[in-house]
Image (cartoon, rainbow, N blue to C red):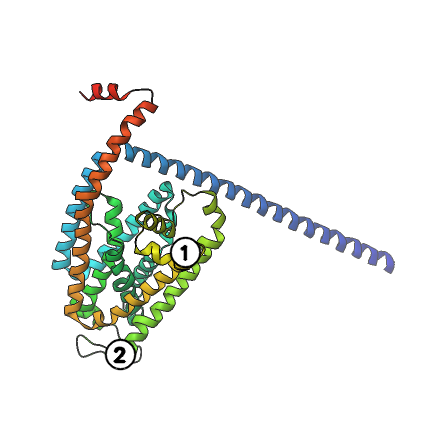
Amino acid sequence: MASNEAMEVNDSNGHSFGRVKQRLKDRSKKVAETKEILSKQAVQTKQILSKQVDKIAKQAEEHERFINKVTHLLGVLGFGGFCFILGARPQDVRYLYCLFYVIFVPLRWMYYRYKKWHYYLLDFCYYANTIFLIMLLFYPTNEKLFMVCFSFAEGPLSWALIVWRCSLVFNSMDKIVSVFIHLLPGLVFFTIRWWDPVFFGAMHPEGTAQRASWPYVENKSHLWTWLFFVPLVAYAMWQVLYFLIVNVLRRQRLLRDPEVMTSYRELSKKAQKANNVWWRLSGLLGDQNRLFMYILLQAIFTVATMALTVPIFLSYKLHVTFQILKISATTWYGGNFLLEVMPRQAMKKIEMQPIRNCQDGSTPENQVEDQD
């Protein structure tokens, strides 16, 4: 009897174990099926979004002239409104910047995705702007984070406007966004540093008494730590991540499609065409080491511009002069683009139009008749 009972218990235990095992198999199968369905839905959603972006971009190209006129109108009005707010309510400039970022950066991603320029959004300026947004929205009174952001904004981002010749052209949304991505952060931190004593005065190291003077400046070692050394470490982290993503993880993707643009591809292409100083410097160690030289030159540029943020942080007059320099440079480059570059582009379009018409089956003579 005892042996029979033991056998029954073993049978029931084995049966229970089999059922549990079967349930686990069923659950794992359901999980696998769910994952497969979700991945298919994600691919379909991505394809739908890509098609919509392509459709919008093509429609925009078809109505380019009208869009340029509207963009010019909105650009002038928007820049005028921004200047008014900068003078009337400088404490609200940071909220205007946050609104600008959350609206135009996603739109830029869609446009750049269509153009195969989306790797530009991995550049340092977007990395820095994301940190700015986090600081302004979630850690507005964190003094050390503020100084790191100040170094980014008035260091590499601001000097990039001048060195890379960013043009303030009101009929080009792409150029306006490029200028504002580099220009607005510096203006935001300028207003906080000098024109908003309540906001800046709320920043103080933990465990210390409230500040009694304005402006308050820590000792020089403190300034160099948080305006130079710590930002350099944050920059080095970005550089490592960028290299791993673009030059390691996505290397094969870039090799397969030469139309996909990155900052290095764009700059090297322009530098080679112009045979300028940047192309000659990047080739000092040979063509095979141009990428390394590009990273090195960018690092030297970053170190130099971050070092300049210390005197800018300490001097109101120097800081005001720097703001005027940045705006003047972008406006000058914008005038140069309108008066020299755009006419050349228009002439090229006119020269290419007869060729396109011939390819479509018409002749240049027919085109002239149609124009008349």
Crowding at dot 1, Cα within 10 Å, few <14 / some 14-19 / many 20+, comes out as some
Quadrant hosting residue 280: bottom left
In this view, the residue in front, 198 or 57, is 57
Q: Is residue 38 above or below residue 14?
A: above
Q: Secondary structure at mark 1?
A: helix
Secondary structure at badge 2 equals helix
The residue lying at 39 percent from left, 56 percent from top is: 283
Residue 220, which numbered label? 2
Q: Which residue is mark 1?
A: 290
Type of residue at label 2?
Lys
Q: Is residue 52 or residue 369 the one in the foreground?
A: 369
Q: Picture quarter containing residue 364?
A: top left
Do the CB atoms of the residues marked 2 and 1 lie less than 8 Å apart? no
| Residue drawn at 24 percent across, 56 percent down | 161
Q: Earlier in the sequence, mark 2 or mark 1?
A: 2
Amino acid on which the number 1 mark rests in the picture: Arg
Question: Position of 208 compared to 73: left or right?
Answer: right
21 to 214, vertically: above or below = above
Image x and y of residue 345, in percent: 24, 38
